[in-house]
Amino acid sequence: MKNQYQTQEAKIIKITRDSADVKLFRLEMVGGSVGAPEFYPGQIMEISLPGYGEAPVAYCSSQSQRKYFEICVREIGLLTKRLHELKVGDTIGVRGPYGNGFTTDVIKKRNMLIVAGGIGMIPFRSLLETACDNPDEYPKDIQVFYGSKNKEGLLFEKDYDKWCQKIDMHLTLDEGKEGEKIEGVYCDIGLITKLFEKTEVIKDAIAIVCGPPVMCKFVVNELKKHDFADEDIYLSLERRMECGVGQCEHCAVGPYFVCKDGPIFSWDKIKGIKGAI
Amino acid sequence: MANTFYCLNICATIVPIMIKDQLSQFIKYLLASNEIYGPVQKGSVLEVEKIAQPTELALNGQLTHHSWKKVFLPACEKLFDYKGSSLSEAINDYPQQVAFGLTTFDLKALNLFNHVYEKDPYYQRRKCKTLLIGQSVAPEQDARTFKVFTEKLEEDILEHLEFDIFFEQRGDSFRVMTGSEEGQRVLADFGYDDYEHIQFAGPTKEEGLSARTLAIKDQLKNHHDPKIWEKLGKKCIECGKCTVACPTCYCFRLDDEAVLTEGEGKRTRCWDSCFYREFSQVAGGHQFLTDTAQRIHYWYYHKFVRIPEQYGLPGCVGCGRCTRACPVGIDINETLAKIVNSDPVGAL
Ligand SMILES: Cc1cc2nc3c(=O)[nH]c(=O)nc-3n(C[C@H](O)[C@H](O)[C@H](O)COP(=O)(O)OP(=O)(O)OC[C@H]3O[C@@H](n4cnc5c(N)ncnc54)[C@H](O)[C@@H]3O)c2cc1C
Ligand code: SF4
Ligand code: SF4
Ligand code: FES
């Protein structure tokens, strides 16, 4: 019988340090004919380091890249610390993809505002890379608001140049020097809500938000002020996960499961659930 | 058959009966080639244990203190042996076993497990090797529960349960029913064929979930008073005993355990409890369920909202084990009455 907890081996073929505690790992499936599993941006996988357990992480590379896939991981505990010690050529286990991701066409038919705080930027890289690789499929406009504590914490700077050809990108730092340019992108100082005051927010758009819960609350308020309908606001939620397949009950939010029905939920669906964000 | 006895039941039809001696012989017969788990008297309570003698089985229609779930899903089970980053599926030894004496409550809970663990090779392998033998519940057991037996055993209950053989207590004897071909085969091999067969008609009735289950779900999801949880949160000591005793609690976590050889060990699945603080904890130490009130609400919400929505089955079978297990006297029927009768003050 098929075993849903079985993992497949993936080999690390490249490691790049992206900030003080974050590394980007390029992986290739071992033994298969293609190097990457099929996934949608926004979906997640469980990575497994036997002896250290498993951890849910987002796919971080373009959906069109079939030779390899990437994950971007912050070192924060047992498993992630061990992962950061691994070298090119080492293998890890992966299973998935899990969750809904951006599987519907809504992201291709509507303008899109992406709001990311801190490592909340990670799942969006896959979406932005996919959109840049497939401009015909993603003909609509994309605007990004990305906030980080400081300059050192910003992720994916090397990609900004490419993204900016398609994407209207705005950065803000909690602390730093006003007006500095990072990889060609103007940098504000202040909380992410400031970008809503200073920038002309994209119209007729859906908004997708990922970041710490406090940020999400403030951002939802801003979006409501800018007349975004509840069903046009999407949030990516974090919860403790064990199984990834809707069985273990660790990741429930009201009647939903982050692993199966999420991690992306429309605000419309979860706004009535106490503690959702 | 010569050794079959008959009695008149209330509606004056004649039903075949197995007497105690025969039952005892049947248990002995099964013991020859199976491990048998069943209710055994342990001090003042019954517990599900492995038996060696037919006389150990207490088939009196009483509920065991803890549920039967350990027979189908061990408290900790090895899923894989690991070496480096690769996992090899553990080939656990699943002996041919008999679960003897599951009450209708327990069989109802098994309906749910069958769905939850539908795609789980470990559960399925174990279940394929398990003969399910049910027994009717003693009438007085029913007083504190959802009064299941206002329904008719045969039409309303048994045809919606999966079992191989079922014994309905009739005084000192038992009426015998089968629910599967396997049950018929086992009885035939033993040399008994005066049973009635009940055709499994799916885990729910044609009309779906009961009105009561739907009413609780709606009330809990949309209309009840959240103060209920604050009060329960002050009482509950988060011991998790209710979750261990309950036949429908199935939360688990996955753990890795190293062995002495470098880079080798096993990945296990162990029962977990939503009453424990680490249950909702993520990296960095943040807990999404921040206090006892939220944890107990999560438990009720799982049973009475999430399970019915996810599986189309009731998440509570009304056995009352959680109430019996609770050291501080939290009574599920009282809580449900509060939920159903409380004022609509918005969702929690
Ligand atoms: C939907 C989703 C997507 C995520 N995507 C990413 C990503 O792309 N990059 C990234 O760096 N991080 C991501 N995370 C967070 C990441 O899963 C945790 O940082 C990681 O599990 C920490 O593991 P650890 O062993 O290093 O931490 P520890 O604190 O040592 O973990 C201890 C235990 O807690 C569990 N645990 C801790 N945090 C989490 C968590 N957030 N979710 C589930 N279980 C947890 C682990 O399973 C482990 O058993 C994501 C989390 C979720 C829920
Ligand atoms: S009555 Fe209590 S122990 Fe029995 S199924 Fe319901 S919740 Fe579980
Ligand atoms: S048995 Fe009672 S005290 Fe213990 S966790 Fe359950 S409700 Fe709380
Ligand atoms: S991770 Fe187990 S139910 Fe979602």
Image: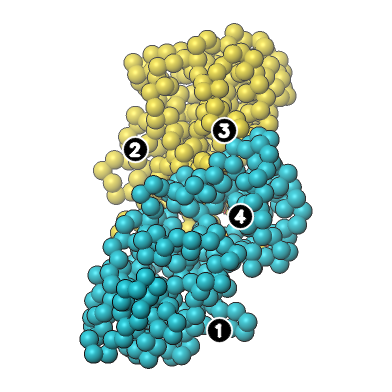
Chain colours: A yellow, B cyan
Amino acid found under the numbered disc labelled 3: Ile
Nearer the camera: disc 1 or disc 3? 1
Neighbor class of circle 3 (other Cα within 10 Å; few <14, some 14-19, many 20+) is some
Nearer the camera: disc 2 or disc 4? 4
Disc 1 designates what residue? B41
Numbered mark located on residue A38 in the image = 2
Q: How far apart, in angstroms, are the residues tagged by discs 2 and 4? A: 33 Å
Q: How far apart, in angstroms, are the residues tagged by discs 1 and 3? A: 48 Å
Residue visible at 45% across and 18% down in the picture: A162
Pick the front one: A97 or B303: B303
Mark 4 secondary-structure assignment: loop
Quarter of the image holding residue A211? Answer: top right
Q: Please state, as top left, top right, bottom left or bottom right, where the N terminus of chain B lies in the image.
A: bottom left
Disc 4 designates what residue? B274
Q: How far apart, in angstroms, are the residues tagged by discs 1 and 2? A: 55 Å
Height in image: B128 above or below A231? below
Marks 2 and 4 close (CB-CB < 8 Å): no
Whether marks 3 and 2 lie on the same chain: yes
Residue visible at 77% across and 53% down in the picture: B234
Amino acid found under the numbered disc labelled 4: Cys
Numbered mark located on residue A270 in the image = 3
Can residue A275 be seen? no
Marks 1 and 3 close (CB-CB < 8 Å): no
